[in-house]
Image: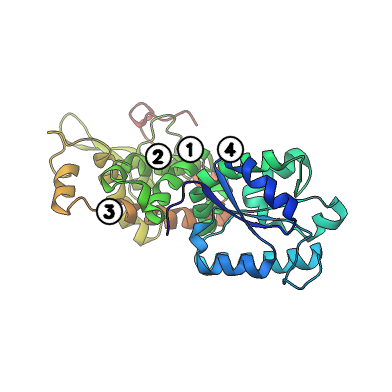
Amino acid sequence: MKAYDLIQILWVEDDHKVTETYPLKAESFDLELVPYPCWDDAKAALESDYDRWSAIILDAKCKHHRESKDSAVVFLREALKDISVLSEKNGHIIPWYVLTGGDESEVSDSINDERMQWDKDWTDSENKKYYSKNVDNEKLFRRIRYHAYKSPRIQIQEMYRHVFEAVAECGIDDNGYNALEDLLVPIHFPKDIKDRDYNDKFEKARTVLEYIFRSMSLHGILPDWGKQVNLQWSSCLLSGLSATRRDEKGNEQVIIECKKQIVPPVFRLLLKEITKIIPAFCHSDNKEEKEIKKEEYLRDVDGSTFLLKSFAFQICDFILWYRNYLKENSDTKLNAGNWDVKDFKAAKIRSL
């Protein structure tokens, strides 16, 4: 895609007075408004170079075809339908906004709720679905610039919509939500990050796991670890294994007894590896870690990012499984009956 100095905005507007004055103002917000007089022309521009555009502005009372009459109902119906189809075809959505001089009765009923994905706070604060010319145009330019800079996250939220819905339904903290985005965005938008920098994000994977396990604690599936989540013991308890440690004599001591395996066999294997590798890879190699050495591994695979990316995808599946499990196992007391603390001091958990 061609590099542009300004953020590219596809603008459907047929009023020459407006197209002559608004672009200059938009430039002060780092936006280049590229006007098209009807939806046919704008659609052709989208189809020929979809990735050029960071946003779409629609003047509601515009034309569907060049020879059409201005009609907000027809224009918005056809434009929004085509935008939805093109976003599906291209794998990501371009945020769109309605900027119009028309009154609410002409516009609002024709604007669908897809825009709530990126513009909900505007509707919540202003109680309208559109932006008014001369009154809201600068506000719109500011919001477009803001959304353009964070648009990869919007697109990731759409691509992984079911995963992020599961995050919300399970009550996983926003810190876990944001860390998961940090892992997924570079996979699909790799140009802005070097492989070396992405491989420094193992801490993000650990953060997601910690907040998943904290959520499970709230539902009784795991003990409440407090601030310091024990990843390996969490993995054991989910996998049907008791949390143990060696005493001074080298004998195995049960700290938390597990009475039931929660996760299916695939996750039992995956969690064992993930909770062993990720913490080790969050730090530089040290003498204490005999087996797992991050620098050595990355050197052997030419600095590949595939291991962390694979963990990101595995965590997504884990979240989807968790949501479905929680739907069938919502009783906190029953969930907590699957494990039994034998040594509270050694377990370092909050009181039940």
Return the x and y of residue 250 as percentages of the image width and height.
Answer: 16, 35
Distance from disc 1 to disc 4, alpha carbons, whole Å, reads 34 Å
Instruction: Name the mark nearer the viewer: 1 or 4.
Output: 4
State how far apart marks 4 and 3 are (Cα): 43 Å
Which residue lies under the disc numbered 2?
207
Whole-number angstrom distance, CA of label 4 to CA of label 2: 39 Å
Q: Name the residue under label 3.
A: 307
CA gap between label 2 and label 3 equals 17 Å
Q: In this view, does 52 lie to the left or right of 107?
A: left
Badge 2 marks a residue whose secondary structure is: helix
Give the residue type that dot 2 points to.
Answer: Thr
Q: Residues within 10 Å of mark 3 (few under 14, many from 20)?
A: few
Asked whether the viewer can see residue 71, the reply is yes
**Does 189 sit above or below residue 345?**
below
Numbered disc in front, either 4 or 2: 4
| Amino acid at the residue labelled 1 | Asn
Q: Determine the residue positioned at 73% across, 50% down.
A: 18
Front position in the image: 197 or 336? 197
Tell me where residue 9 appears, x and y as whole percent.
Answer: 58, 53
Q: Out of 89 and 269, give the one closest to the viewer.
A: 89
| Disc 2 to disc 1: CB gap under 8 Å | yes
Separation (CA) of disc 2 from disc 1: 8 Å
* Mark drawn on residue 175: 1
Which residue is pictured at 17% across the width and 44% down the height? 292
Amino acid beneath label 4: Ser
Instruction: Check disc 1 and report its element: helix, strand or loop.
Output: helix
What element does badge 3 sit on?
helix
Q: Position of residue 333 (x, y in %)?
A: 55, 43
Earlier sequence position, callout 1 versus callout 3: 1
Residue drawn at point x = 51 percent, y = 43 percent: 149
Question: What residue sits right under mark 4 in the picture?
Answer: 28
